Amino acid sequence: MDTQAMHIANGIVDGPVSALFAVLAALGLGVCVWRARADLDDRLAPMAGLVAAFIFAVQMLNFQVLPGVSGHLLGGALAVVLVGPWVGALCVATVLIVQCLLFADGGLTALGLNITNMALIGTAAGYLLVALLMRFLPKTPAGVGATAFIASVLGVVLASQGFVLEYWLGGTTELSLGTIAGTMAGVHTLIGIGEGLIAATTVATVARVRPDLVYALRRFRTAPVAAQPVTVSGGAA
Amino acid sequence: MSADDRNAPAGRTAKAHGTARTRLGWFLAGGLLVALLLAGVVSSFASGSPDGLDATAREGCTFNADDEITGGTCMAQQEQDHQLADSPLADYGIKGIDNEYVSTGLAGVLGVLVTFAIGGGVFWLARRRGTTDATTGDGGATVGAGAGAGTGTGGNDQAIRDTPAPGTGSTA
């Protein structure tokens, strides 16, 4: 068994449930395409391409979280902060599709499962937290970085529980669901912290260089602060 | 300097717009370069341990030195090969290149470029054309530029450079 695989492989969840989630994933992405058009303008479109490429790159960087266990960024929260929930989900899905078709990572049969967990659940959870946190945190690089960190940790843990749900519905082995849920949640809390650090660094850097390219700063602005999201006087809220 | 551009009055001219276009271009190029370095170079130093999901799937089984399952019950036993396991880029390497660093690095670079091309291309085609500045007060000039951009790829940059100010436009 190769250790390069990063996503759900074929055979772990049975055919009917995989097919069900393939349909769900297709419907979900359809909604995203429909809603994404409102966000996709001449500035966001190339940025979204970059976000997808960046997530692909960082997903290759497995970091050690426990002896013999590694993890890698999933990218949902990062994408949400930079390009918004609808386009963000499509960015993550693009990465998963390229990985599946070109690099044989994440089973073809399991593609719907992987898209549901990482592109839909991870991004949706990340978005809800970003929308909540951006109401309280300052619209500064530090504020948006902290938002990305928290949204990443919770987004990753929830995405991992998506797998538990799928395994509960269509698992092909007789194993204790509680144990699997616990192990997945525990390991993915650690992975989420790693992802959070990467995502926070990334979005804080973009917010410093080009705040106008950060969706979360544009979308959740409060009128006076928005004019100069990058200045130190952000605390004036 | 950058703050200067963002706070420029909406009507401020081609010079400010030109700078903004350059900056988006440089930003994208810089970001892509970082991604290429991460996927092309840093990836070779990534951890080779199974990831969180894989580790969970292997729990309950014992493995021999060749990483084959020797006993127990675990999810990984049910794992089947990928339909495209024989593809030339399977498992983030390039078939035929023995040097692991080169193989992984090139696969990573290729992956970043393909993802950027597919993602960027699809998003670019799906974008709303010439509507970027509809929400700002910056009416006339922008609409003109947007219309020009729609006619050919050469004009696309022109559209991009008109975009950086909408956040400020509406609040100014």
Image: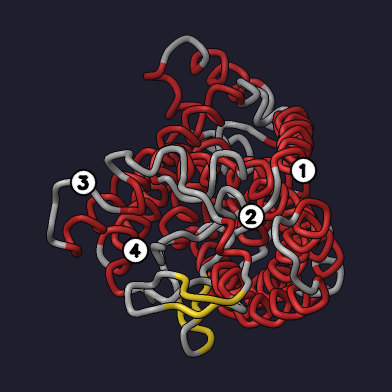
Residue A168 seen from this side:
yes
The local crowd at label 2, few if under 14, some if 14 to 19, many if 20 or more residues have their Cα within 10 Å, is many
Q: Are marks 3 and 2 in contact (CB under 8 Å)?
A: no
Residue B136 seen from this side:
no
Which structural element holds mark 2?
loop
State which quadrant residue A195 falls in.
bottom right
Q: Chain of mark 2?
A: A
- Depth check, mark 3 against mark 2: the one in front is 2
Residue at the disc numbered 3 = B95
Residue visible at 50% across and 60% down in the picture: A6
- Residue type highlighted by circle 4: Leu
Residue at the disc numbered 1 = A17
Residue at the disc numbered 2 = A12
Residue A149: horizontal and vertical position, in percent?
Answer: 66, 75
Which structural element holds mark 4?
helix
Whole-number angstrom distance, CA of label 3 to CA of label 4 = 21 Å
Residue B11: horizontal and vertical position, in percent?
Answer: 60, 34
The local crowd at label 3, few if under 14, some if 14 to 19, many if 20 or more residues have their Cα within 10 Å, is some
- Give the residue furthest to the front: B71
Residue at the disc numbered 4 = B38
- Residue type highlighted by circle 1: Val
The local crowd at label 1, few if under 14, some if 14 to 19, many if 20 or more residues have their Cα within 10 Å, is some
